[in-house]
Amino acid sequence: MTAEAATLIRVCAVDDLEVERGRAALLGTAQVALFLLADGSVRAVDNLDPYSGANVISRGIVGSRGTTPTISSPMHKQVFDLGTGECIDAQGKDALALRSYPVVVRDGEVLLEWAQLPDAEGRR
């Protein structure tokens, strides 16, 4: 096993995802929201909405702000950058963010970097 393979975890096949429709995956105790974008790239962020505390981000609306792919929370409609997890609508000390996870697509499989996944207490 190579060092690279040891740091990646298979989540699903790309064919399990629909364009611009979120899917949630349970990895250990963490829920991750996966999004297949129209350009064929896959993005992954926390499924836990930091504003409502509900695991609903995978049910949000995919969009964009300029060239930045975004996801809008279905609860309170905050808009998050799908690349960085930053909340685009909030600023300063009130700004909360989603964790974003590096994704590798290889041979039709979606892989996440294992080192980036939080443990049961939310630590990385």
Image (tube, rainbow, N blue to C red):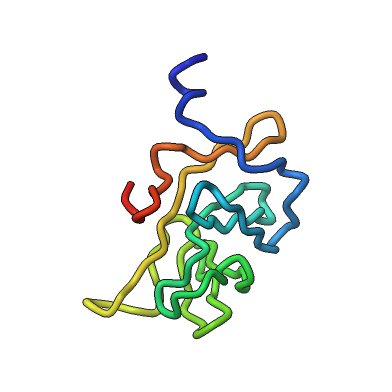
Residue 65 at x, y percent in the picture: 51, 70
Count of numbered circles in the view: 0
Write the residue at 30% across / 75% down: 95
Name the residue furthest left.
Answer: 93
Name the residue furthest bottom.
Answer: 76
Write the residue at 60% across / 70% down: 63
Residue 53, above or below 105? below
Which of the 4 image quadrants contains residue 24? bottom right
Query: Is residue 21 rendered to the left or right of residue 123?
Result: right
Name the residue furthest top.
Answer: 1
Write the residue at 39% across / 49% down: 118
Residue in front for this viewpoint, 99 or 105: 99
Query: Is residue 99 rendered to the left or right of residue 123?
Result: right
Residue 66 at x, y percent in the picture: 51, 68
Residue 5 at x, y percent in the picture: 51, 23
Write the residue at 35% across / 55% down: 122
Which of the 4 image quadrants contains residue 71? bottom right
Residue 77 at x, y percent in the picture: 52, 82
Residue 111, above or below 17? above
Query: Is residue 96 rendered to the left or right of residue 61?
Result: left
Residue 107, above or below 73? above
Residue in front for this viewpoint, 18 or 65: 18
